[in-house]
C-alpha cells in the first residue's frame, strides 16, 4: 500500500445507547474490542501512522491498547466528525493520503479499503458508499442527474426528497491531507445538530473541481456501526455465521453453524467435527480427524490428530497429542501437555504437567506441576499436593507406575517406574521402582463390638 497513507480512526463518541460504563469502542465483538478490529484492519493496509481520536473515558481506551504504535489524539468535546478529524491533522504529514475510519465500525474488510484507496488520488476524494433498504439515520449521497456526487446531506438536515435517497455515506473516506486541512478549516456548524460535519467537505471539494470517486463494499455488514447492545449482538451473529461458513467451505463438519462461537482464530485439519455450543478463544488448532463434543470451551490450545474431546470440558493453553480422549467434564489448565493416546476422564484437572504416551487419568483427580511417564494409570481421587502454602513442588511418576485410588502424592516426591501405590496412601517419600508402597492406617478388627442402640423414649 502507498507509503504516504495515514489512518485517522474516530473513536470519541460516548455511546450513550450502550447503557454501559465501558466506552463504546471497548465493547467486544468476537472477543476483541471494536476498536481492536478497526486497528487490525488499519494495520493490514501498512499505513505509516495510525491516529485515534478519543474522548469519552479516554484513559481506559488508551490503556486497552498499551504497547501498540498509535498516535492518540484527545478530543475534549465532541463537536462533530469534521472537528474530530481536524484534531488529528496537526500530527499528519502534509503529503499524506488520509483514510478516515470509525472505531465503532468493526468489520470493514481490508480488501474493500484497498479498493477504495486505489481509486483516490493526489487530487480526489474517495468515498465508501452503500445502498441500504433502510437508510434512516445515515447521511445521503446527493448526486447530479448525470451521476456525479455533489454533496452529502445528513438525515436531520434532509428534505423529504433527499431522505428518499437510498445511497448512504458509510463515513469512510480517503482524501489528501493538504486539501483536507483547507476544507476542515472552513467548516461551519450551521446545521440541525450544531456540529462540524466532515461530510460538508464533499460540497467544498466539488466547488473546487476536485473529483469525488465512490466505491461500495461487497456486503452491508462491512459498514455497519455499533450504537446499541442489539446492534452489537446482531453483528456478532453475522460475524460468527460468516466464520462458520468459512469452516464449512473448508470441509469442517459443524452440527449447527448457528451454535458455534470463534473468538479468535480457529484452524482445522481435514475431517474435523464440531458439535453444538462450542466456544473457541484465542488461537486454537485442531488437527485432522479431531472430534469436539458439545459444550466445550477451548482457548489457545492445540489438539492432535484423531483426538476426541467429549462434552463439557474447559481446555486452556494445553497441548494435546494424537488419538487422546478428553472428558467428559475434564479441565485442562495452562501448561497441560499430553502426549499421544492419553485419556483424561471426568472431573480431572491437569495443570502445568507433562503426561507421556498412553497414560490414563480417568476420574476425579488433580495432577499439577507433574511429570507423568508412559502407560501410567492414576486411579480415582488422586491428588498431587503440589502447594505448601508458599511454593509449588513437582511430582514425578515413572513409566508404567500404577497409582491406586484416593492417593495423596505430597510433592516434591517421586514414584519410580513400574511402582505401585496402594489405595488411600499419603505418599511423602520416594517410592522405589517396581516396589509397592502403602501408607495408610492398617485395618483392624474389633471383635465382639456392639453397635449402639437407640435409647427408648421417655
Ligand atoms: C456520520 C456521518 C453520516 C454517516 C454516518 C455513518 C457526519 C456528519 N455524518 O453520522 O453521514 O452516514 O456517520 O455511520 O460525519 N465522532 C468523534 N467525534 C465527534 C463526533 C463523532 O470521534 O465529535 C466519532 C464517533 O465516535 C463515531 C463516528 O465519529 O465513531 C461517527 O459519529 P456519529 O455521531 O455516529 O455520526 P453519525 O451522526 O452517525
Ligand atoms: Ca453513527
Image (cartoon, grey):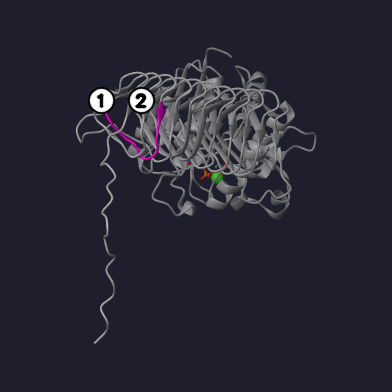
The image quadrant of residue 212 is: top right
**Count of labels in the image:** 2
Magenta span includes 265: no
Q: Looking at the image, is mark 1 or mark 2 earlier in the sequence? A: 2
Lateral position of residue 426 relative to residue 331, left or right: left
Quarter placement of the N terminus: top right
Q: Residue at x 24, y 26 (%)?
A: 429
Q: Secondary structure at mark 1?
A: loop
Q: CA distance from mark 1 to mark 2?
A: 9 Å
Lateral position of residue 458 relative to residue 110, left or right: left
Q: Is mark 1 within 8 Å of ligand 1?
A: no
The image quadrant of residue 116 is: top right
Q: Residue 307: where, in percent of width, then height?
A: 60, 28
Magenta span includes 404: yes
Read off the magenta span.
402-412
Front residue (pair 204, 161): 161
Q: Is residue 216 visible from the viewing direction of this image? A: no
Lateral position of residue 208 relative to residue 198, left or right: right
Q: Residue 165: where, in percent of width, then height?
A: 73, 46
What residue did someone put label 2 on?
A: 370
Q: Residue 400: where, in percent of width, then height?
A: 44, 21
350 lies above or below 50: below
Front residue (pair 149, 339): 339
Give the class, few, some or many, for how many residues have Cα within 10 Å of label 2's Cα (few <14, many ≥20). Answer: many
Quarter placement of the C terminus: bottom left
Q: Secondary structure at mark 2?
A: strand
Q: Is residue 202 visible from the viewing direction of this image? A: yes
Front residue (pair 203, 10): 10
Image marks 1 and 2: residues in contact by CB distance under 8 Å: no
For residue 412, the mark is: 1
Front residue (pair 51, 341): 341
Amino acid at each position: 500500500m502507498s507509503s504516504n497513507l495515514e489512518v485517522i480512526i474516530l473513536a470519541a463518541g460516548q455511546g450513550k445507547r450502550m447503557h454501559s460504563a465501558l466506552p463504546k469502542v471497548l465493547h467486544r465483538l468476537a472477543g476483541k474490542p471494536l476498536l481492536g478490529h478497526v486497528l487490525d484492519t488499519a494495520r493490514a493496509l501498512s499505513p505509516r501512522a495510525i491516529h485515534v481520536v478519543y474522548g469519552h473515558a479516554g484513559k481506559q481506551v488508551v490503556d486497552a491498547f498499551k504497547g501498540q504504535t498509535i498516535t492518540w489524539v484527545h478530543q475534549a468535546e465532541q463537536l462533530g466528525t469534521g472537528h474530530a478529524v481536524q484534531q488529528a491533522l496537526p500530527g499528519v504529514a502534509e503529503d499524506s493520503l488520509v483514510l478516515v475510519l470509525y472505531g465503532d465500525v468493526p468489520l470493514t474488510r481490508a480488501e474493500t479499503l484497498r479498493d477504495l484507496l486505489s481509486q483516490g488520488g493526489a487530487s480526489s476524494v474517495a468515498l465508501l458508499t452503500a445502498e441500504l433498504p433502510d437508510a434512516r439515520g445515515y447521511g445521503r449521497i446527493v448526486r447530479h442527474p448525470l451521476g456525479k456526487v455533489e454533496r452529502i446531506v445528513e438525515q436531520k438536515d434532509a428534505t423529504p426528497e433527499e431522505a428518499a435517497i437510498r445511497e448512504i455515506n458509510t463515513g469512510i473516506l480517503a482524501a489528501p491531507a493538504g486539501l483536507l486541512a483547507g476544507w476542515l478549516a472552513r467548516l461551519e456548524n450551521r446545521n440541525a445538530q450544531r456540529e462540524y460535519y466532515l461530510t460538508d467537505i464533499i460540497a467544498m471539494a466539488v466547488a473546487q473541481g476536485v473529483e469525488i470517486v465512490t466505491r461500495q463494499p461487497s456486503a452491508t455488514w462491512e459498514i455497519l456501526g455499533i450504537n446499541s447492545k442489539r446492534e452489537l449482538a446482531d453483528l456478532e451473529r453475522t460475524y460468527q455465521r460468516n466464520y462458520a461458513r468459512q469452516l464449512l467451505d473448508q470441509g469442517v463438519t459443524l452440527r449447527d453453524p448457528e451454535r458455534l462461537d470463534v473468538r479468535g482464530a480457529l484452524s482445522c485439519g481435514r475431517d474435523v467435527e464440531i458439535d453444538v455450543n462450542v466456544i473457541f478463544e484465542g488461537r486454537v488448532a485442531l488437527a485432522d480427524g479431531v472430534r469436539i463434543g458439545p459444550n466445550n470451551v477451548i482457548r489457545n490450545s492445540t489438539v492432535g490428530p484423531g483426538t476426541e474431546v467429549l462434552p463439557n470440558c474447559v481446555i486452556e493453553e494445553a497441548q494435546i497429542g494424537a488419538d487422546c480422549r478428553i472428558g467428559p467434564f475434564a479441565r485442562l489448565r495452562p501448561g497441560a501437555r499430553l502426549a499421544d493416546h492419553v485419556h483424561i476422564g471426568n472431573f480431572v484437572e491437569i495443570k502445568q504437567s507433562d503426561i507421556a504416551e498412553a497414560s490414563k487419568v480417568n476420574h476425579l483427580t488433580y495432577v499439577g506441576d507433574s511429570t507423568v511417564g508412559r502407560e501410567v494409570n492414576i486411579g480415582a481421587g488422586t491428588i498431587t499436593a503440589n502447594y505448601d502454602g508458599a511454593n509449588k513442588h513437582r511430582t514425578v511418576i515413572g513409566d508404567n507406575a500404577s497409582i491406586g485410588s484416593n492417593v495423596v502424592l505430597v510433592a516434591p516426591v517421586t514414584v519410580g517406574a513400574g511402582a505401585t501405590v496402594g489405595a488411600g496412601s499419603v505418599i511423602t517419600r520416594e517410592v522405589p521402582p517396581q516396589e509397592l508402597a502403602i501408607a495408610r492406617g492398617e485395618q483392624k478388627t474389633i471383635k465382639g463390638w456392639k453397635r449402639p442402640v437407640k435409647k427408648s423414649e421417655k
